[in-house]
Amino acid sequence: MYLHSLNNLRALSIILIVFNHTFWVSNWHPESVYSGLYKFLLMGGTFYFLFISGFLFNHLSVENFSYSKFIKQKIRTVISPYIFLSIFPIIVAVTVYPVYPEYFFTIKGQGIWLEYIKPAILYFLSGRVLTGYWYIPFIALVFILSPLFVKYSKFTLKNQLLLLGCLIIISGFTHRATDNMNPFQAVVYLIPMFMFGMLCSAYNTEIKKISMGYVTLLILGSTILSVYQLVVLNIPGNLSKEMFTYAGFDLRLIEKGMQILGVYLLFERFCSKDIKFISLIASSSFAIYFLHSIVIFVIKRVVPANWEGFLYWHLLTICVVGICILIAWILKKILGHKSRYIIGW
């Protein structure tokens, strides 16, 4: 069964991820509550990615799960492109232009191990050499834990909800890792969204029967939580901290869970058909993910310095997505099915 609404959600998720990363080079900053809320609502594409991953894991992998086949497939389509596209940036980071040097480097003159080899290994294991690449070490841990999620799929609904509720509470007190440096903390923080996606897949038929009134409540509730975080708690975006410190309860996971489910159900009702352009974005989403940081890096150094602002942010997002699809399409034509090992598509 092909799920067009989930495919459309997949396209939206990668666009939101690119939106999030182009924001930081647009030099635009919200100056009102409304513009701040607009930015706040657009952030969080990673949560969409996790929801979709959990949904598809339950939909495609749980029934006849083979750990070895699953891991081999993920190595081919996720880990291999990560390795290939990370090699050159890591070489540059340890020799010419260090990224997050405070995390990876010690005082100069400490020898080859501390100056080059150890930082290169840490860059690879954390993914912090290119924007957004931290997701790959994190999702690799999720892949390793996949047998546990297969067991979770066999629980009764009551036990599934109980465990998910407990993990959401733990996630709320954990927060994101500072600078997304800790893949293990990312697992604790984000894994409830993956499991929520699994549940929505398992009970997809029942969920799709939810009335429009409840869908409206989901979207409204998510928006209210966004306003509360932005205006009352004065949180402009994602919270982050060290894992074993206390900094309050993070509502982001709950807010995004409501938003994602609401948007998915809206797609089910009003946008469940195959739209070729959206399908192209969805099918190439991993290629866009792997390429967009590199494209942003190049564009940032080519365009005039005075190109900035709200409109530029949106135009830049469109351009980055378009350029990534074009590059991916060309590589796919040249390399055929082998392109999956290079760009994940």
Image (cartoon, rainbow, N blue to C red):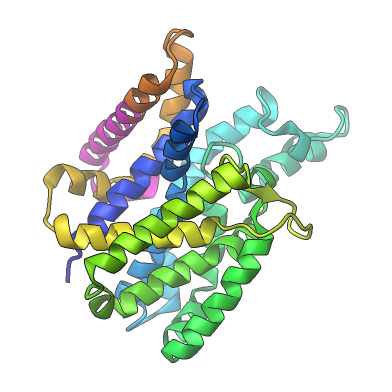
Residue 277 found in image quarter: top left
In this rendering, position of residue 198 left or right of residue 322: right
Majority secondary structure of magenta residues: helix
Above or below, comparing residue 11 to residue 300 in the picture: below
Above or below for 79 versus 333: below
Q: Position of residue 226 (x, y in %)?
A: 49, 49
Q: Nearer the viewer, residue 39 or 273?
A: 39
The residue nearer to you, when weighing 117 against 258, is: 258
The answer to which image quadrant residue 189 occupies is bottom right
Q: Give the residue drawn at x 71%, y 50%.
A: 241
> Relative to residue 202, is residue 18 depicted above or below?
above
State left or right for residue 133 relative to residue 125: left
| Residue 155 visible (yes or no) | no
Image x and y of residue 287, in percent = 35, 43
Quarter of the picture holding the N terminus = bottom left
Question: Furthest-bottom residue in view?
Answer: 156
- Find the magenta span and give its range: 318-342
Residue lying at 84% horizontally and 35% vertically, measured from the top left: 106
Report the residue at 17% width, 62% height from top. Answer: 269
- Residue 263 shown in magenta: no
Which residue sits at x=27%, y=41%? Answer: 335
Any part of residue 123 in sight: yes
Q: Position of residue 90 (x, y in %)?
A: 60, 35
Q: Above or below — where is 54 with respect to 138?
A: below
Residue 319, how many percent across, how many down? 31, 26
Q: Taking 275 as reference, is 26 left or right?
A: right
